[in-house]
Amino acid sequence: MAMQDGAAVLLPALPLLGALLLFLFDACGVKSPRTALIALVSTAFSFFLGLFVLWEVIASGPLLLRLPVTLPGLAGGPLWGVDRLSAIMVLLVTGVSTVVQAYSLRYLLGEPDYGRFFGLVAAETSVLVMLVTSRNLLLIFVFWQLMSLGLYLLMAHNRRRRNAVDTAGKTFLVHRAGDMFMLAGILIAKESFHTLDLDRIAEILKNTPEAVSQGTLSALVLCLFVGCMAKSAQFPFHFWLPDTMETPTPVSALMHAGIVNAGGYLMNRTSILFAHSPLSMHLVFAVGFLTALFGSSTMLTQSDVKRKLGFSTMGQMGYMTMECGLGAFSLAVFHLIAHGIFKATLFLESGTAIAIARKDPAIPRRMAEEPATPEGFHLSRGLPVALVTLVLPLVIVLGAHQLADIHLSREEGTVVFLFFSWVTVSQVTISLTRARLFDSFAAAIPWTAVLVLFVYGYIGAAHKFNLFLYPDPATRALYFSSGGVGWVMFTPIVLLITFVIVAGWVVAFFRGVRGRQILPSWILSRQEALYLFFLNRGSVEHLFLHRVVEPVDRLLWRLRELFDGKERA
């Protein structure tokens, strides 16, 4: 076995070895907190080995391993290996796990089953590494189940908290519901392609795409997608994710930064199947759009910081699913990695803030005494604000695309990339403007320069990442063409969304600067009901309360007033 193959094998083996040692110490009654360093060091070594393996994959191509024996359902190709996508995901998983374990050394010190917790985290890390490096659908499904089992044990780690245990059970059941569809998809794949090896399936679709009918292929893809929906909290399988906040904060960080990404990873690993089913791609986009809208809107109504972050994750996973539905699979991975690192940091910081607040009862009072930041934009004229927050980002994004030699007229995917970039950068500039960083030229010039560098770096990195993950131009073209809807439909959709964004900006501007409300009265009259709808997470209980209970209650009050009036008469 070459040195590179040996290093690749150690990627999941090191965290697993650390977990087994910790479980052994726990069984033998060794309770020293220092044993947790075993899991931390083994995971950190796996991360640094991942850097070496990534370098080797870039230089020499994928590292593929086969079993020395033939097993039913696992024959016909390499079962396990590291390619560019796997190497990137291994770095994300082991990197986030290392940070989470380092944070937990002090955060969970003194908690019961301290060593067992680190053993579970290390074991879950090993399972995740095996999941992202498997190249056979059956093997992926096996580690998919082990990942759910590890998540259940981590969520129910504090067995004295009834809510945590109940939530862990609900999450486990929701995931199993999605996995039934995933298993059905695997059976369809076996019956249709007579193999579960992903490389062999890709070869069949490339050489003889007519070998499998569109109906069968769409059923296969949609079954796999339902499994991804349950794991990545897509609507309507989303309700398990926001209720997981009773778990320790490090578990939330690992879950939101790593485990929920499994759905996005599986869509990318099986992207060749999705690309040959345009109807499924359109449905994926619709589900992602609905999830992003619902999750982001609900996030704005929540007051609990961890629950707010949970709905934020739901919205971001919907955003990532939209990118997959549009054929921008590499952009989805880019988004997935950035969100994973960012969300892990936010959860760990929220845990620190909550711990400080519990020890300092004066914090809420001090915050209440501080002067509030004025709402709205702080420029006196509308034109400079529009130039700074809407036009300037568009100019910068167009310039970056031109510099990267990305031509807008060639494919819908490029316009999608441009549109996502413009929306993201506009949000950044609006936030900077609200923070009064563009009130003067002295402040605006350096921030604009930083913004330009940020945009060029972001677009350039995303473009290079696209070439890195999918170097074959034909593959990239296939993805975007499959996710496209044709310019006849695509152009009105883009124009409509652009109009909605600009209209929302105009409403916010007039409300923040002019102090005027320009929305129609029929919309304003429904604001409270809409707010309550998202505050209550669009639940059936909320609909029942406002559509059944309240009308009956109003009717009873009116009857009471009527009879009281007659009695007085």
Image: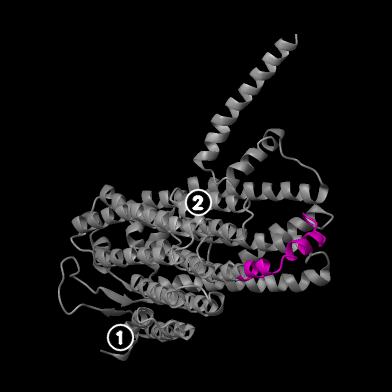
Which span of residues is magenta-colored?
Answer: 352-377
User: Which kind of residue does numbered mark 1 sit on?
Assistant: Asp
- Is 250 rendered above or below residue 182? below
- Is 160 rendered above or below residue 559? below
The reply to whether residue 137 is visible in this rendering is yes
Residues under numbered marks 2 and 1 in contact, where contact means CB atoms less than 8 Å apart: no
Using the numbered discs, state the Cα–Cα distance from disc 2 to disc 1 in whole angstroms.
Answer: 40 Å
Q: What is the number of the mark on residue 291?
A: 2
Residue 30: give x, y in percent of width and height.
41, 83
| Residue with the most extreme top position | 569
User: What's the residue at 64%, 18% (across, down)?
Assistant: 559
Q: What is the number of the mark on residue 439?
A: none
Q: Nearer the viewer, residue 74 or 369?
A: 369
Residue 27: give x, y in percent of width and height.
35, 78
Tag 1's secondary structure?
A: helix
Q: Quadrant of the C terminus?
A: top right
Tag 2's secondary structure?
A: helix
Mark count: 2
Q: Nearer the viewer, residue 317 or 531?
A: 531
Quadrant of the image occupied by residue 168: bottom left
Residue under label 1, please give it. 5
The reply to whether residue 412 is visible in this rendering is no
User: Which kind of residue does numbered mark 2 sit on?
Assistant: Thr
Q: Nearer the viewer, residue 52 or 122?
A: 122
Magenta stretch: includes residue 368: yes
Residue 14: give x, y in percent of width and height.
37, 83
- Is 22 rendered above or below residue 240? below
Residue 251: give x, y in percent of width and height.
49, 68
Using residue 69 as the reference point, say whether residue 205 is left or right of it. Answer: right
Q: Answer with mark 2 or mark 1, whichever residue precedes in sequence.
A: 1
